[in-house]
Amino acid sequence: MMGKASNRKKAARPGGGADVHTQIAAEAEAVRNKDRLAFQPAERTPALSALLDSAAAALSKAVPATFEHEGRPYYLRVSFGLVRVMVFETATASEPMTLAITGSMDEFGHLPYH
């Protein structure tokens, strides 16, 4: 997944083109204006897809490695197999700029039973 996400981030930054945030907004508006909610291939909206990849990476980084319960530490590994992500342009926006159901099979670099 990392290779694909990296390629989307590169595609989202065309040389000499529009500002990436303008491109994200335009792609998000085009997706919102579709007649029906449906699967959207990442290749059609590279800037928007790169934004969602960054959101997923931020979620992953926010997961603690350990947590405590009843005085004892436990170790946590989380895989975001399916996540509903809403991205807002401002803290006070009433509607999301984009909404996606996304996920990953990544296990944070750990082999099962590692």
Image (cartoon, grey):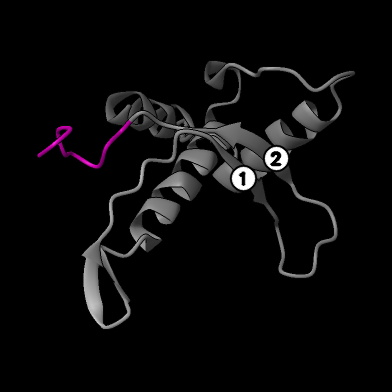
Number of residues whose C-alpha sits closer than 10 Å to that of mark 1, classed few (under 14), some (14–19) or many (20 or more):
some
What's under tag 2, amino acid-wise?
Leu
- Image quarter in which the N terminus is found: top left
Q: Of marks 1 and 2, which one's residue comes earlier in the chain?
A: 1
Horizontal and vertical percent position of residue 65: 25, 62
Horizontal and vertical percent position of residue 9: 41, 34
- Image quarter in which the C terminus is found: top left
Locate residue 93: give its quadrant. Answer: bottom right
Residue sitting at the far front: 70
**Which residue is tagged 2?**
99
Residue sitting at the far right: 35
What's under tag 1, amino acid-wise?
Val
Span highlighted in magenta in the image: 106-114
Q: Is residue 92 left or right of residue 51?
A: right
Q: Is residue 13 left or right of residue 94?
A: left
Horizontal and vertical percent position of residue 18: 60, 38
**Which residue is tagged 1?**
85
